[in-house]
Amino acid sequence: MTQTPRSSRRSTLLLAALSCCCSAASATEANFQHYRFTPIKLRNDATANSIQLAEFQFLHLGAAVSFTGAITSNTGGSTPAAEASANLIDGVNTTKWLDFFRSSVTFSFSEPTTIDGYRFTTANDAIERDPVRWLIEGSNDEVTWTLLDHRDSDFATPTARATSSGDIPLPATPQPYVKNWTGSIGANWDTINANWNNGADLAWNNASTDVARFGSGTPSSITLSEAISARVLEFNAPGYLIQGNTLTLTNVTRLRGTGNAEISSVVAGTVGAIKTGSNAIALSGNNTFTGPLQVRGGSLTLSGTNAYAGTTTVTGGGTLSFTGASTKANGLLEVGTAQGKGVLDIGGTSTLLFNGTPVVGTGAVTPGSGAIRQSGGTATYSVSGQYFTLANTVGSYGTYELSGGTMSTPTDSGIRVSWNGPAVLTQSGGSLSSGRWFAIGGTNAKGIATFTGGTATTIANYRMIAGDQAGGNGTINIGTAAGGNAVVSTVRTATGANDGSLTLANANNSTGTLNLNSGTLKLHGRIYHPTTATGTTALVNLNGGTIQAGEENVELVNSSLTGVRMFRGGVTIDTDGKAATFAAQIDGQSDNGIYFPGDSLSVPPLDGGSGYIGAPIVTISTDGAGSGAMAVANVTNGVVTGITLTCPGTGYQAGDVLFCIFDAGGFDEPAMLLEHTLTAGELASNGTGGLTKVGAGTLTLTQPASFTGPLNVNAGTLVANSTLAQTATTVAAGATLGGSFVTAGPVTVNGTLAPGTSVGTASGSASLTLAAGSTFAAQIADWNGVAGTGYDTADFASVSITATSGNKLTVHVDATGLTNFSETARDFVIASADSAPAGLSAGNWQVNASGFAGTGTWSLAVDGNNLVLSYEPGASGYGTWISGFPGLSDNSTSGDPDWDGISNLMEYALNGQPGTSSTQILPTTINGGGNLSFSFVRRTESKGDTTQVFQYGPNLTAWTDVAIPASSSGNVTITPDSPGPGLETVVVTVANESNSILFARLKVTLP
């Protein structure tokens, strides 16, 4: 602001007073086209959140000056749409002007207009918002302003509502409101020495509302030798330092100017700190001020251990930075409003809390653009049930760049990346945590969240959502073509299928996309699309990175999605010791995608625009047939310098022209349309992308997979109950491939092949190679069954065995749940081919039948085009059984070497251990209900070489015999393979209607 002497247009007139006493009064005229009203003190600055007035009138010769053709402006103000400055001249007392920023109002006439006074009308409520001190200035160009009135003491503004102030004449000589620092009596700022000049040398007055202006005066290092109170500090020359005692900000305060400065004194007061002007001011002290913290121009840096509370607003092109150990207890947050864009920088060890509904990018009538850049410290946003929001209103823009520190919302508070306007969240480091929904892509708006470093978590049972609201477009990028190592997690503690999920296309006509390029996506819930939403697109693009199971039995990806597409980078799935299911079809992309050398495409230096506070949203189209390519913009020093791909797309050809449009970003000058003609060196086939299974645990594929890149099972178990395309499948040592799958590609097993999920068939139209040290796990469920249903088998075009005598092929016989077993010869075709299996020799295989109840021998041979596992029964009966226990003191049938009262023959029949006390094998009886039930478990083979008789009677001499048959008959029920293979459960039931006492026993003899 420039304060000049009175214009020659001003003159003094003697007017006849119209009062009854006929006294004379003088009035001073002014003639300007523009008049400005600036509040400098309100009735209660500490409690008022705004200024308000109902009406304002200029006077001339006792009459109101007509506002016909006049307009008002409230530059730098913050007003609700219904309470704009135009209400001051509408002639209606029931409307009002309200300004949260307590800024000036300019009244502009169509031509210079003469006034000699003014009056205003109080608003409808809140007397604390009434002005009691102000400035009136005039100008013909809105650059040079002339002071007409300085109300430097409190005016008796009526406390009554909708009441006129009365006529206020312009004074002949208004008191100057600017004091210029001269430092003529030293470097101390106090209330004693005349270190100031406002036309005359004078000392500072703590009670004044004057402007403390620091221009060309010296010294520039100023010490407060006593506590100082000031309303406005204006620095118009660089290098000033204010230090020493406490500086208390008062009234309608401002920190402004064109010269950079530092204030290391403690800044105190209850009216907040308001930064305007283009300069940079640093507050480096341990400040204690409360009230609003507003940056409406230039930059304000808090580098000390500030402790303050109140609303924080950054707008008007301003930047607020926390670089020290600042703390903030509470208060709302607005960054980028209708008054202009704003940037909040958070670093150091700051601990900041913003409550309510923090917004970055807002403004109903004039949408604003806002950015938060966090490199350190801890920032917590919102309160329970609310959201931290980027791009709050239609047309606004918001961005958050997290490179370090901790960003979080508390329990039951979420994050919105785009609510009604475009928004971008980028995390390259630090920790991010959302305590509620993490929603991306609001109503008819586009949001992008890109994670290249650090950790990001959505807490228990809430979801990360891309495409949240109707018509919304949300994209989640985990890594980019340039890489990244972020870990993004969803957390689940409830049992609902969608708790802790990642949701794509949540609402009607929405689009949700997940691009996985690098880093890790840890899922406690599934990736899915609500089937109730219509007109949607829900896509997962796999081009690198890892999906990790975070929950036992988690469904990683659901079949409800529009598509899961495999690109050149493929995907790694880590089950991390858990069982997980991939329930969506995986579509291979065989055509060319875009793979720029260096992973990005540059924007010509003169085409990148200027003034960007964040990355614009990139939309890629082409004149060719390709589609699906996606990218994020790279911004350096406010200029778009290039794009980095997040999805390569498919179907592109050399010679195709790409068109890249840049939208939003808070620019001053927008970047131009980027046109680029693709070359062969920028294209590559997507078809080499495959799936790698790592980690202990089991991954089950339930849907077809058409990708042609490799399928590598490096650890744990992969169960494929689906069809596989021409993918080369390799099973590493220690890993297992299972399932009833059909593949068109070769399978090489260095670990274990276990066809089926219980019993089944693994088949393929290419080769099966059982390598050295590999295992074929053959489950036999039915001794009399056929291949594929009774026992496991494999059916391939060719089968080869590359094992050696020193590193053999192992066939593991799994008899879990085996039925119908008998000691009979049996052949099992465990593999078949179009030609004879190759590579089997006498010394390069072995059979592991541990846990199998049979006593015979196993062999492996090629028979025609089949690989046959054969069983030959061995010697059986008591003699063979007892010989398996060498070292017994007595191995006769009547012997009892373990002194448990059970003979060796009875131990044999009841599947006991002759050298170990085993009374638990003895029969049990139940006498009641008119029957006696006698139960025992016997070795199946014992019925072939022993005679078994159940005897019962009323005493120990009169016995009735019941022969135990080979199978159920009469009153004897025999359950084979119960409780396991090679065993039978025998139950004998005899009538005992009187429930009298009966004696019962089992007699076993050899023929």
Image (cartoon, rainbow, N blue to C red):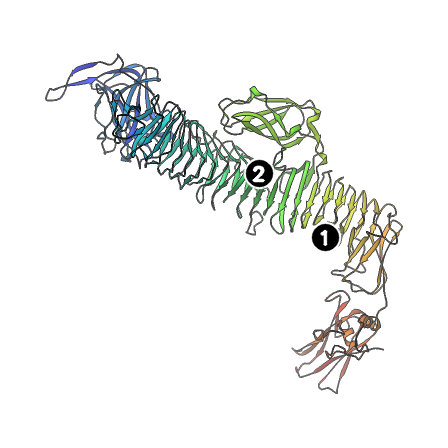
**Which residue: 65% across, 23% down?**
623
Percent x, y of residue 348: 47, 37
Please give left or right for residue 397 compared with residue 1002 in the image: left
> Which residue is situated farthest in the left direction here?
21
Residue 95 in sight in this render: no
Assign a secondary structure to mark 1.
loop
Up-down: is 774 above or below 337?
A: below
Q: Name the residue furthest right.
A: 864
The amino acid sitting under disc 1 is Thr
Q: Which residue bears the numbered disc 2?
A: 453
Residue 339 image offset from top left, x and y in percent: 41, 27
Q: Nearer the viewer, residue 149 or 65?
A: 149
- Where's residue 477, x and y in %? 59, 36
Q: Which mark is residue 757?
A: 1
Residue 224 at least partly seen: yes
Q: Amino acid at mark 2?
A: Gly
Q: Quadrant of residue 193?
A: top left
Is residue 748 placed above or below 223 in the rendered structure?
below
Return the disc, 2 or 1, that comes first in the chain's sequence: 2
**Above or below: residue 872 compared with residue 234:** below
